[in-house]
Amino acid sequence: MLHPWLLNPHFDEILVIHSLALLLGLLGNATVIVVMVGDRKTRSNTNMFLVSGYFLLAKSWRVAVISAKKHKRQRRKRQFVTAKREKVANAKVLNRNTNLT
C-alpha cells in the first residue's frame, strides 16, 4: 500500500482520529507521571516502578535514534572506503601509477 489515501476514502478521518488518540494518550501518561511523582501520600514501590518504566522507555527510544544515526554515518564511511578501494584496484589493473593507497 504505497498510497493508502487513494485506496481508502476515509484515510484523512482515520489519520486525524489516530493522531488525536496518540496525543491524548501522551498527555494522559504525562499527567499520571506528574501526579505520581508529586503526590507523597500515594508514593509506593509500584508507582515509582511505573514512573521509572516511562523514563526507561523514553531513554530507550533516544538510544535507538542515536544508534540509527551512528549506523547511517558508519554506512556512509564504508561506502567511501569501498569506493576508494575500488578506485585503487582499478588503477592497479590498468597499471596506472596512483598515490591513492
Image: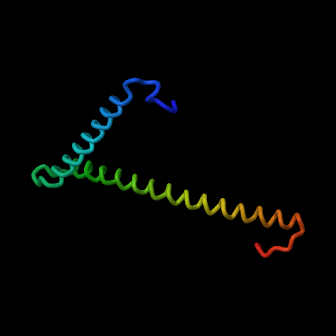
**Quick one: quadrant of the C terminus?**
bottom right
In-image side of 20 versus 73 (left or right): left
User: Hey, which residue is sitting farthest bottom in the picture?
Assistant: 99
Which of the pair 58/94 is nearer the observer? Answer: 94
Residue 23 horizontal/vertical position (percent): 27, 42
Residue 54 horizontal/vertical position (percent): 30, 50
Q: Quadrant of residue 76?
A: bottom right
- Residue occupying the point 81% across, 64% down: 89
Total numbered labels placed on residues in the image = 0
User: Hey, which residue is sitting farthest left in the picture?
Assistant: 41
- Residue 45 against residue 99 in the figure, above or below: above
Q: Quadrant of residue 83?
A: bottom right
- Residue 76 against residue 30 in the figure, above or below: below
- Residue 35 against residue 77 in the figure, above or below: above
- Residue occupying the point 62% across, 63% down: 77
- Residue 6 against residue 33 in the figure, above or below: above
In-image side of 19 versus 66 (left or right): left
- Residue occupying the point 22% across, 43% down: 28
In-image side of 75 versus 100 (left or right): left
